């Protein structure tokens, strides 16, 4: 692999990592990216279980994902036995 190809690959990886997100927000975003292709609706408590967080932590860290411009769209969909998020690619 040439130096140019390596530099380009690294630049692409860096551009996909939003620098203004906290570590928890980044983990949630990565989780949604991995799962949005096969699933549309996510409950905060199920995201929390998978990431080792509390449902409250997930909900508190979703605002930047709702407001940001990412490759997944997040909408607060409902609140019945916990918050549900609609995620589309």
Image (tube, helix red, strand yellow):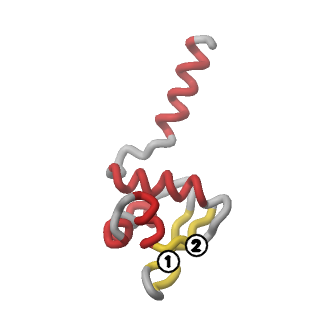
Q: Establish if 22 lies above or below 78.
A: above
**Quarter containing the C terminus:** bottom right
**Quarter containing the N terminus:** top right
Residue 38, quarter of the rendered image: bottom right
Residue 9 image point, x, y percent? 57, 27
Residue 70 image point, x, y percent? 52, 54
Q: Establish if 58 lies above or below 31.
A: below
Number of numbered discs present? 2
Q: Residue at x 44, y 86 (%)?
A: 81
The residue that mark 2 highlights is 41
Name the residue furthest bottom: 80
The numbered dot on residue 84 is 1
Left or right, 69 with respect to 20, comes to right
Dot 1: within a 10 Å radius of its alpha carbon, few (fewer than 14), some, or many (20 or more) residues? Answer: some
Q: Residue at x 47, y 88 (%)?
A: 80
Left or right, 15 with respect to 5, comes to left
**Element under disc 2:** strand
Q: Residue at x 41, y 65 (%)?
A: 48
Marks 1 and 2 in Cβ contact (< 8 Å): yes
**Element under disc 1:** strand
Dot placed on the residue nearer the N-terminal end, 1 or 2: 2
């Amino acid at each position: 692999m040439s130096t140019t190809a390596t530099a380009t690959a690294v630049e692409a990886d860096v551009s996909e990592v939003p620098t203004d997100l906290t570590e928890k927000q980044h983990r949630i975003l990565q989780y949604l990216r991995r799962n949005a292709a096969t699933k549309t609706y996510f409950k905060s408590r199920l995201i929390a279980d998978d990431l080792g967080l509390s449902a409250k932590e997930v909900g508190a860290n979703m605002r930047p994902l709702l407001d940001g411009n990412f490759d997944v769209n997040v909408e607060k969909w409902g609140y019945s036995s916990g918050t549900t998020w609609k995620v589309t690619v």
